[in-house]
Amino acid sequence: MTSTDYAVRGMTCGHCATAVTEEVAKIPGVTGVQVDVATGRVTVETDQPVSADAVAAAVDEAGYEVVAA
């Protein structure tokens, strides 16, 4: 299992966290998603390789943006 951390811009509340979690969880291979709104960090746990582009696209679909850490 691999854990990767992403910085996400624009999240401010629990609804934001839920939206990001739901979209990222749809990516094949993702086994867990933890969102910390206070720090703007999203940790994605996977059981197979998942591209950063796929995570960024899912975050974008939720209405937010992955930014350089």
Image (cartoon, rainbow, N blue to C red):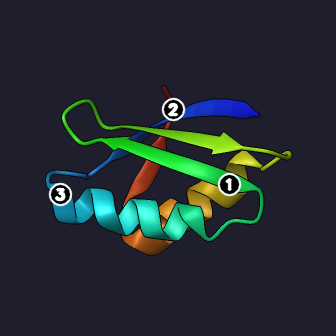
Nearest the eye: 46 or 67: 46
- The amino acid beneath tag 3 is Gly
Which residue lies most toward the right here? 48
User: In the figure, residue 56 lies in which quadrant?
Assistant: bottom right
Q: Which badge, 1 or 3, is on the more N-terminal residue?
A: 3
Q: Label 3 near label 1: C-beta < 8 Å?
A: no
**Residue with the mark numbered 3:** 14
**Residue with the mark numbered 2:** 68
- The x and y percentages for residue 42 are 44, 41
* In this rendering, the label closer to the viewer, 2 or 1: 1
* In this rendering, the label closer to the viewer, 3 or 2: 3
- The x and y percentages for residue 40 are 30, 37
Residue at the location (24% across, 52% down)? 11
Q: Which badge, 3 or 2, is on the more N-terminal residue?
A: 3
**Residue with the mark numbered 1:** 30
- The reply, left or right, for residue 50 in relation to residue 56 is right
Give the distance between the C-alpha atoms of the residues marked 2 and 1, in whole angstroms: 21 Å
Give the distance between the C-alpha atoms of the residues marked 1 and 3, in whole angstroms: 21 Å
Q: Label 2 near label 3: C-beta < 8 Å?
A: no
Q: Could you say whether the residue bearing mark 3 is in a helix, strand or loop? A: helix
Q: Which badge, 2 or 1, is on the more N-terminal residue?
A: 1
- The x and y percentages for residue 49 are 85, 45
- The reply, left or right, for residue 56 in relation to residue 15 is right
Give the distance between the C-alpha atoms of the residues marked 3 and 2, in whole angstroms: 23 Å
Quadrant in which the N terminus appears: top right
